[in-house]
Image (cartoon, grey):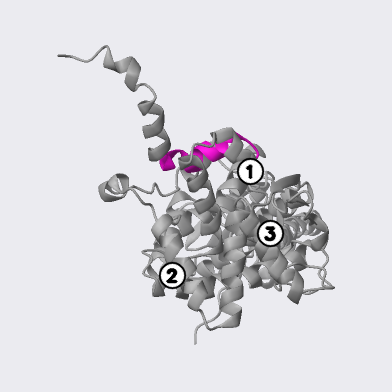
Amino acid sequence: MGRPKRLYPLGKYRLRTPKVIDKEKAYPIELEYTWNRQIIRKTTNVFVKVADWNQNGNQGRGEIRVSYGSEFKRLNQLLLSRVERIDSQLAEYNEKHPNQITADVISGFLSDKPLSRRDQGKDFVEFTLERLSSDYSRNRIGRSRYENGRSCMNIFQTFLRATKQATCGNDSIYVGDVTPELLDSYIAWRREVKQNTDATINHSLTPILKACAYACEMNIMEPAINARIQDMRIITKTSLSEEESEFDGKSLNKEQMQALMEYYKTCQEPRRKEFLEMFFFAFHACGLRVVDVMTLQWGHVNFEKKELRKIMIKTNKRHVIPLTEPAIHILRQWQEKREGCRYVFNLVKENLELDDEEALYKARNNATKCINQSLAVVGEQIGLPFNLSMHVARHTFAVFALNKGLSMSVVSRLLGHGSTDVTEKVYARFLPETLSSEVARLKDEFASLEII
């Protein structure tokens, strides 16, 4: 085994002499560091003759002999003090920035102008998690996005360990070392190793890209680098067949809803039947989100007014939803078997506190996963070309409502969207019946303009 490499170099002095030495001439003493086969030197203002210099003195660091004169002790102390100071600076730098010492860094210390990293030695993963925590504490993001961001960064650390591209410890990297090339490698790794879709990869890039943008604002990342990084998202292309398809796989048509009802009537598994009742309730309750179905309490329901009033979990805004007769029928069924319970549906523990965001996040994930796994089996058995999930109930309600002539603004309010822009962006493609009926209203006007 060879000698282990030092984490940082130690300096020593040498007398700078020409090939032909003049014994009567004094030559300058240079401070020298060797690192990665590179020699970095800095001259001093001390000149001595060859006879007055001892290269082996001071444990090989070099020293001035006694023959130099009365000043030899003072000069040796100055030389030793300088090399020890730079050695300690390099040791401290290495401790703060492991494996980051370069010839430029050493030259900076020799010139008494230490080269400082633009990123100030910040750990990128830690920097990103700090930004997530800050956004979450200021209510700029919800618990779900916060936890998803943390999960994405855990996988990013796994990538750094697996590919040995970490520069800050074993599983992180300095802000200044994050490059488009690194993210190209990360995208390829997620595709090949994690088998992720483009949509999932884009999702995983979100906290990284936001952290890079903020780092650029703080002037700890090059603007040109950040600009290239912000362009790293994968552009998902819609195939021609998808563009021409009348059904995009996110909602049920009338025939599929009827098939689902028939399955419900013959279902012999009690819990799966309950999940289907929750699906139908979400549909009839104007596309109520699964998290709001899960946290629905009897105190939210007013049977006399046929409505429910609830603060929506996602938007944190109070929402009034008119209840149809099918929705009320389902609630009456559950009222009989859940009398005295706090929550309407048997999805969460009775002692769940909605103000406990971490507990709510875990409960929602567990409930959603359980329901969707069961519904996916139902979807397969009735021959759906996509995975059936609770969110499909929301999309199905919106499509039915729009195609029955309800205005975009009304549907937006029923869904609890923040603005009609959101509704239009998601559901504009679901208007073939509505658009056809609107054009039909122009029939009489167009008749007089018909070309004979």
Q: In the figure, is residue 141 to the left or right of 260? A: right
Measure the C-alpha gap from mark 1 to mark 3. 17 Å
Q: Can you name the residue that lies furthest to the bottom here?
A: 1
Instruction: For mark 3, give the secondary structure.
Output: helix
Q: Do the residues labelled 1 and 2 touch (CB within 8 Å)?
A: no
User: What amino acid is found at the position of numbered circle 2 in the picture?
Assistant: Gly
The residue under label 2 is 379
Magenta residue span: 417-431
- Residue at 49% from the left image edge and 67% from the top image edge: 261
The quadrant in which residue 432 appears is: top left
Q: How many labels does the image show?
A: 3
Query: What secondary structure characterizes most of the magenta part?
Result: helix
The residue under label 1 is 414
Identify whether 55 is placed above or below 209: below
Which label number is shown at residue 328?
3
- Residue at 56% from the left image edge and 63% from the top image edge: 390
Identify whether 242 is placed above or below 382: above
The quadrant in which residue 75 appears is: bottom right
Instruction: Give the percent coordinates (x, y) of residue 154.
Output: 60, 67
Measure the C-alpha gap from mark 2 to mark 3. 25 Å
Instruction: Give the percent coordinates (x, y) of residue 371.
Output: 58, 71
Could you tell which of marks 1 and 3 lies nearer the N-terminus?
A: 3
Depth order, front residue of 366/86: 366
- Residue at 26% from the left image edge and 46% from the top image edge: 240
Residue 383 seen in render: yes
